[in-house]
Image (tube, rainbow, N blue to C red):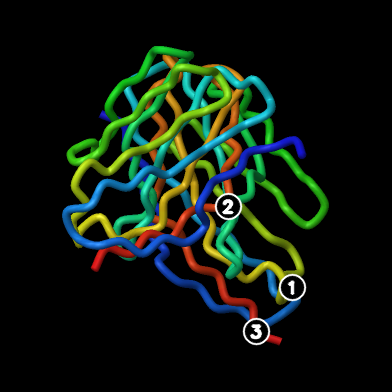
Amino acid sequence: AQKVTQAQTEISVVEKEDVTLDCVYETRDTTYYLFWYKQPPSGELVFLIRRNSFDEQNEISGRYSWNFQKSTSSFNFTITASQVVDSAVYFCALRDNYGQNFVFGPGTRLSVLP
Amino acid sequence: DAGITQSPRYKITETGRQVTLMCHQTWSHSYMFWYRQDLGHGLRLIYYSAAADITDKGEVPDGYVVSRSKTENFPLTLESATRSQTSVYFCASSEDGSSEQYFGPGTRLTVT
């Protein structure tokens, strides 16, 4: 069975601090896909990034970066120089190779204080 | 407008009534999904569909029925609503079996 764990339930930081959100996953598949989504206070779910299991390159997009390590089954998300607008719940998700099973972690609520 | 839409956005109904939540996407995505989001449970998959006329159960399908006669529509029906079905329901679609999902705005359903 697939599982996604986000051990940090809530994180609070002060604006301009860097923050890392942890994601650990479990799967027996050799091919799978990992995702991060953002849910701001307005409630919508916003796609941030997709990574397949064969691509372990880290990715940077502006203030956001992702560290994928198969050896530790982790796909961590770092926000550099956080801003108040980054306050949201962030979900890590895992999709299997057959496209059917899409499992979300419980989410991490990030509060960025001015 | 292009995208994925849900209707209604808010619904209050009584226990025992039938309710249908609508989902429509304009991308011709193959896959569509229904989730419910509750405090303490995150997002849980109710049903998904890989293509028109193909549907399958997710983690929490009991009490729900889906259909997909057209690629763009994926309605979710609560045949006899219960208070435990009070939740926010999200519809999503993805282009294929490996792509990211794009979510609708959600429907907040209250069962009294």
Q: Nearer the viewer, residue A56 or B72?
A: B72
Secondary structure beneath dot 1 equals loop
User: Split into 4 quadrants, where in the image is the N terminus of chain A?
Assistant: top left
B110 relative to B23 in the view: left or right:
left
Instruction: Judge the density around disc 3: few (<14), some (14-19), many (≥20) Cα neighbours within 10 Å.
Output: some
Of callouts 3 and 1, the N-terminal one: 1
Disc 3 marks a residue whose amino acid type is Leu
Mark 3–mark 1 Cα distance, whole angstroms, equals 8 Å
Image x and y of residue B10, in percent? 47, 61
Chain letter for mark 1, please.
Answer: A
Instruction: Judge the density around disc 1: few (<14), some (14-19), many (≥20) Cα neighbours within 10 Å.
Output: some
- Are discs 3 and 2 both within one chain? no
Image x and y of residue A24, in percent? 41, 44
Image x and y of residue B25, in percent? 62, 31
Label ID, residue B105: 2
Chain letter for mark 3, please.
Answer: A
Secondary structure beneath dot 2 equals loop
Whether residue A45 is situated above or below residue B73 in the rendered picture: below
Mark 2–mark 1 Cα distance, whole angstroms, equals 24 Å
Chain letter for mark 2, please.
Answer: B
Disc 2 marks a residue whose amino acid type is Pro
Q: Nearer the viewer, residue B63 or A94?
A: B63
Image x and y of residue A97, in percent? 45, 16
Q: Nearer the viewer, residue A13 or B30?
A: B30
Residue where numbered disc 1 is placed: A83
Mark 3–mark 2 Cα distance, whole angstroms, equals 26 Å
Instruction: Judge the density around disc 2: few (<14), some (14-19), many (≥20) Cα neighbours within 10 Å.
Output: many
Residue at 25%, 55% in the rendered image: B85
Residue B110 in which image quadrant: bottom left
Residue at 55%, 31% in the rendered image: B93
Label ID, residue A113: 3
Residue at 19%, 41% in the rendered image: B63
